[in-house]
Amino acid sequence: MITIPNVRLRRWLQILIPFVCVPALVAVGATVLPEKQYLLVSFGVALLAVLLFITGFEQKRVGARRLVLVAVMTALCIVGRFIPFFKPITALSVIAALYLGPESGFFVGSVAALLSNFYFGQGPWTPFQMLAWGLIGLLAGYLAEPLKRRRWLLLAYGVAAGVAFSFLMDVWTVLWYAGRFEWQYYLSALAAAVPHTVLYAVSNFVFLWFLAKPMGEKLERIKVKYGV
Amino acid sequence: MQSLAHHNPAAVAVYFAGVAGIAMFCMDPVILTLSLVGSLLYFAVGGGRGGHWFGLLLFAAMAIAGPVLSHNGVTVLFVLNHNPVTLEAVIYGVASAGMIVAVLYWFRSFTAIMTSDKLLYLFGRLSPRLALVLSMALRFVPLFGRQAKKINAAQRALGLYKDDNLIDTFRGGLRVFSVLITWGLEQGVVTADSMVARGYGAGRRTHFDIFPFGLWDGVLTLTSVALTALTLAGLRQVAFTYYPAITISHIPPLGWVGYAAYALLVLLPTLLQGKEALQWRCLRLKI
């Protein structure tokens, strides 16, 4: 139905979505819509961003092995989300990004959010979680070289990602609750979410501390052994 | 039309996008009440499973948070810690809480109806490769769960765990996870090779699905779109403001039509479910 088999069309979409559609949507939301519908706009932007990367995934020629490795990493994220309190999704999508590339990081983070919400409950927050986890993975992929070389940098990235995730999701909480952005609400949402923020940061730190090196070795080994 | 669970996933997705979309982005009290009533009714009639404690708690917390955090509004009820608590903020808090709980219940019903195979059907049209990865990941989840249990049992049999030691338990969990990753990656490559050997990538991928798009699916889609459009058109005619004072504009006939359309939209799945239950009773009575 909506498959985009035409390569040129897909490439155009990849340029159009970030540089035309998203700014246009924000501009229309800020000026034309009544009562400044920030919520509607942010929802649309999150969906568009996720769609953009999914079209990119379709376009890139990916071997069957790499494809399956991405699926395995995604499944591990979902299984890991059942661990009480400590959630390894961020850590695993960062690791996937470091060793399989930025797109894989985005894909693992966002798809793990989508699929695990089948177990934990879908909601209007799903696109925002997808975007937040996806971007954390994507950025880690672009910073792969320094992050792989220095361990403290990777751990710092994990802590920062945990805090950033919580801050980003609170923006969404405020938009949803108040219909517009207000610092008063945002600060109190941040204050209410402090235990979660700390838990995110700590679990990212712990999982990256324990998993980054062994998982990196495992992925490298698989890549060498099977020539992915 | 049958109950939503038996319709084509695309038609169901259109329905939920309309009903939950309006509920999510609109603060009109009539719409919110309708949405809350509709979502709870449908959830009770057969949409979803699970308790209501979370919804109740969320409603209470959100309703209290409104007047505590916001001091806008002109009608001061009383002063708490030098901060005025206003009638407008109280009403806005209740309305926001109602909106959030209604959307929550729509999504709970949505999750119960949209099982993962239906999601795959929808995504398979969007991107075949994405659908493939989704289905593999979903299949790996129970597989990994079972394998993790096996690994854990094997390690326990080796005598690796002490009793009542949190650090030991955590390290053990990590060890099991690590073994699971190695196993999963190896297994994944074997799967990939097997896929290639059977011709993956040789041609266009097709999907098996059992969701034909019939006449009634078309009717459901068109009804959802038409009712959503009517509601939106009606909403443009009414203006309801919470701050600084609660004001209600004159409601023209089109506004009433919009409310009626949304009422029909939220009650649609409950009515379909009821119709089906009634039919079933009649059939049973004939035996």
Image: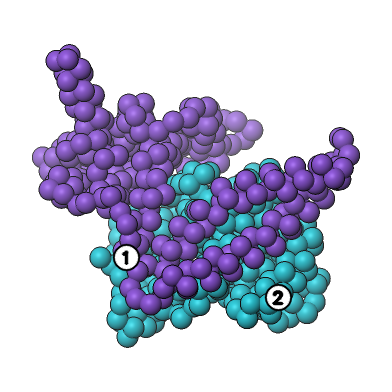
Chain colours: A cyan, B purple
- Kindly indicate the quadrant of the structure image that contains residue B115: top left
Q: Do discs 1 and 2 belong to a common subunit? A: no
Left or right: B263, with A215 as reference point: left
Residue under label 1, please give it: B206
Look at the numbered disc 1 and give the secondary structure of its residue.
Answer: loop
Count of numbered circles on the image: 2
Left or right: B89, with A138 as reference point: left
Whole-percent x, y for residue A188 in the image: 61, 46
* Residue B211 in sight: yes
Q: Quadrant of the C terminus of chain B?
A: top left
* Residue B244 in sight: no
Residue at the location (80% across, 72% down)? A151
Label at residue A220 = 2
Which one is closest to the eye, mark 1 or mark 2? 1
Q: Nearer the viewer, residue A52 or B86?
A: A52
Residue at the location (41% across, 62% down)? B131
The answer to whether B151 is drawn above or below residue B207 in the figure is above
Whole-percent x, y for residue B102 in the image: 39, 37
Q: On what subunit does the disc labeled 1 rest?
A: B
Q: On what subunit does the disc labeled 2 rest?
A: A
Left or right: A159, with A75 as reference point: right
Residue at the location (55% across, 54% down)? B140
